[in-house]
Image (cartoon, grey):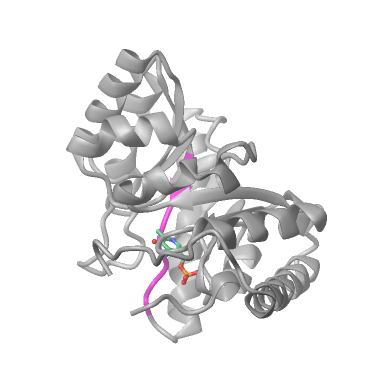
Amino acid sequence: MEGMTLSSDDSTLGPEQAAQLAARLDDVLARLDAAAEGTGRDSREITLLLATKTRRPAEIALAVQLLRERGRTVAVGENRAQEIAKHSDPLLADNEVPRHFIGRLQTNKARDVVAFAEMIHSVDREGIADALERRAEMAGLSREVLVQVNTSGEESKGGFAPTLEALAPIVERLRASDVLRPAGLMTIGANTTDAAAVRESLHLLRSLRDEVRERLGAEELVELSMGMSGDLEIAVEEGATIVRLGSAIFGARPA
Ligand SMILES: *Cc1c(COP(=O)(O)O)cnc(C)c1O
């Protein structure tokens, strides 16, 4: 998938594709609403972030439009620096949707990411905070950031260890910045069909946010970015403020 090229009919979406996207999107909203209702939450307060990797501008634009028509809070989240350019497409450039970056960060892409995203979910090591800060200062921009936490212990996943001791220094370092503002925590839940293990990892993120807030007096840490297509109900039940949705709305990604 890396480096895939987009086909030449990028700007069009057939009526059948559009209808399929709308049907998937309404299924997702029904799942979200049921989960929210079960825990007494208002699902309209949850930001639905469209994970846009590999998707064409026409698909993204339609999903944004449909979510807005349905009164939802929407953002787009790119996770590939090399796909940032597609968000300048005329179909997307002026839609005023908050843009986030959710992917693994490389220091040599920090400038592009800072220019693109008002919230960066994936601060997974000290060095990347330094690079983002430098680029934000140079560009005269301020950016919200989330600290990524490895709540599952899976080695393939980035992020800080899920302990107060590991999180306190990076949170304090971000709070001391004039241009970066820590807004919460992000995780990618355990990659398993074992719902109990998924719940454990998402519950851990919430506990950590509460603990960091309390112990550091960091009231500004409100966001919990967690939950994807497969685990959105658990995420909503565990307090997610931002769920990141790809395949459930756009269909399976091309392999
Ligand atoms: C792709 C992606 C998602 C969405 O994944 P789906 O399972 O397709 O919903 C969420 N978060 C991140 C960081 C991603 O890269």
- Marks counted in the figure total 0
Q: Quick check: 75 above or below 237?
A: above
Q: Position of residue 107 (x, y in %)?
A: 19, 37
Q: Decide if residue 70 is on the left or right side of residue 101.
A: right
Q: Quick check: 111 above or below 29?
A: above
**In terms of image quadrants, where is residue 204?**
bottom left
**Among all residues in the image, which is located at the extreme front?**
8
Q: Nearer the viewer, residue 17 or 138?
A: 17
**In terms of image quadrants, where is residue 243?**
bottom right
Assign ligand 1 to one image quadrant. Answer: bottom left
Residue in the picture at 61% in, 51% down? 241
The answer to whether residue 222 is visible is yes
Q: Position of residue 145 (x, y in %)?
A: 43, 35
| Magenta span dominant secondary structure | loop
Tell me if residue 13 is in the magenta stretch.
no
Residue in the picture at 40% in, 18% down? 179
Q: Position of residue 158 (x, y in %)?
A: 26, 56
The answer to whether residue 169 is visible is no
Q: Nearer the viewer, residue 218 or 75?
A: 75
Q: Nearer the viewer, residue 206 or 6?
A: 6
Residue in the picture at 73% in, 69% down? 29
Quadrant position of the C terminus in the picture: bottom left
Quadrant position of the N terminus in the picture: bottom left
Tell me if residue 186 is in the magenta stretch.
yes
Residue in the picture at 29% in, 22% down? 135
Give the residues drawn in magenta, as a range.
184-191
Q: Decide if residue 34 is on the left or right side of residue 120.
A: right
Q: Decide if residue 236 is on the left or right side of residue 114.
A: right
Q: Position of residue 121 (x, y in %)?
A: 42, 45
